[in-house]
Image (cartoon, grey):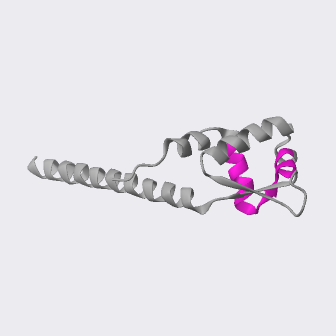
Amino acid sequence: MRTLPESTILALAEPTRLRIVDLLSERPRRAGDIASSLNMSGPATSRHLRVLRVGGLIEETHQGDDARVRVYRLRPEPFAALHTWIERVESGWSQQLGAFKHHLESTRDDT
């Protein structure tokens, strides 16, 4: 059974980072655009982007010849793994709820 990397969950556990992921789900963005959209300082934005990058959720590229201009985009692989993990957990819940429903129905029939 494959488990989800802890770094993925930790990176997404913070509301500001979820907002960054939402922004990047629309299109790739420069760090400055992310900071402006979230009304955050550059250093604070950089710290959140670093956590998302270390967690493997985003990647950084440079725009043109200027290495100072960084563009961030989502990486699809960790989100696919997260989706698969959620489906597996949901399947387990569904099976348990189905068994519980069956138990309740069979108990009700005995009365």
Q: Tell me where residue 60 sits by quadrant.
A: bottom right
Work out whether 47 lies above or below 22. above
Residue under the point 48% across and 46% down: 5
Residue under the point 16% across and 49% down: 108
**Residue 4 in view, yes or no:** yes
Number of numbered markers: 0
Q: Is residue 69 magenta?
A: no
Residue that extends furthest to the right in the rendered view of this protein: 66
Residue under the point 68% across and 52% down: 21
Q: Residue 65 placed where, x, y %?
A: 90, 61
Q: Residue 36 placed where, x, y %?
A: 88, 46
Drawn side of residue 40 relative to residue 87, left or right: right
Residue under the point 24% across and 48% down: 100
Drawn side of residue 63 relative to residue 111, left or right: right
Give the prevailing secondary structure in the magenta stretch: helix
Q: Residue 35 placed where, x, y %?
A: 84, 44
Work out whether 10 lies above or below 85. above
Q: Residue 97 placed where, x, y %?
A: 30, 51
The range drawn in magenta is: 17-35
Residue that extends furthest to the left in the rendered view of this protein: 110
**Residue 40 in view, yes or no:** no
Drawn side of residue 77 relative to residue 104, left or right: right
Q: Tell me where residue 67 sits by quadrant.
A: bottom right
Nearer the observer, 65 or 108:
65
